[in-house]
């Protein structure tokens, strides 16, 4: 299989840069797989898991994906390697987010709290649990 260049960047740091065989990403219209010589495309991402070469997994919370002749780049709003997630802290964050939803005084506050809760639950599902 032919390799291509892939980079995953968040505002905090470059999480991955290198030659890969395949990348599966959570597009806003559904998961998609990029292989070498993929047609050019630019799309938004939803919260979910990016899988590199079938084994390395990173969780992204939104962003943009750009496939071009130069390779594939993901600009994530937030990203973390699945192996770096502290499950106990995540469970506490989910508990706190549920309380924030219940305590919200306005519709906007409730929507924001619910969005955060959904994103945390997506991460929890990604790491298993």
Image (spheres, rainbow, N blue to C red):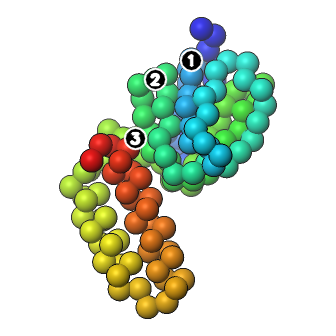
**What is the spatial separation of the Cα atoms under label 2 and label 1, in whole angstroms?**
9 Å
Mark 1 surroundings: few (<14), some (14-19) or many (≥20) residues within 10 A: some
**What is the spatial separation of the Cα atoms under label 3 and label 1, in whole angstroms?**
19 Å
Left or right side of 57 for 37: right
Which residue appears at 35% of the width and 48% of the height? 125
In front: mark 2 or mark 1? 2
Left or right side of 121 for 4: right
The reply to whether callout 3 and callout 2 are in contact (CB within 8 Å) is no
In the rendering, at what x and y percent does residue 100 appear? Answer: 36, 79
Label 2: which secondary element? loop
In the rendering, at what x and y percent does residue 82 appear? Answer: 36, 41
The reply to whether callout 2 and callout 1 are in contact (CB within 8 Å) is no
Residue position for label 2 = 54
In the rendering, at what x and y percent does residue 119 appear? Answer: 44, 59
Quadrant of the rendered image containing residue 127:
top left
Left or right side of 84 for 26: right
Residue position for label 3 = 81
In front: mark 3 or mark 2? 2
Residue position for label 1 = 21
Which of the two residues, 85 or 114, is positioned nearer the viewer here?
114
Which residue appears at 65% of the width and 36% of the height? 73
Give the mark nearer the N terminus: 3 vs 2: 2
In the figure, 15 relative to 70: above or below? below
């Amino acid at each position: 299989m032919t390799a291509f260049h892939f980079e995953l960047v968040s505002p905090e740091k470059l999480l991955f840069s290198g030659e890969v065989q395949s990348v599966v990403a959570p597009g806003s219209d559904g998961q998609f797989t990029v292989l070498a010589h993929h047609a050019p495309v630019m799309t938004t991402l939803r919260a979910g898991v990016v899988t590199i070469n079938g084994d390395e997994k990173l969780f992204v919370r939104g962003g943009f994906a750009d496939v071009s002749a130069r390779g594939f780049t993901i600009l994530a709003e937030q990203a973390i390697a699945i192996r770096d997630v502290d499950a106990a802290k995540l469970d506490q964050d989910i508990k706190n987010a549920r309380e924030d939803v219940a305590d919200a005084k306005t519709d906007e506050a409730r929507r924001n709290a619910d969005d955060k809760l959904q994103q945390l639950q997506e991460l929890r599902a990604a790491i298993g649990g």
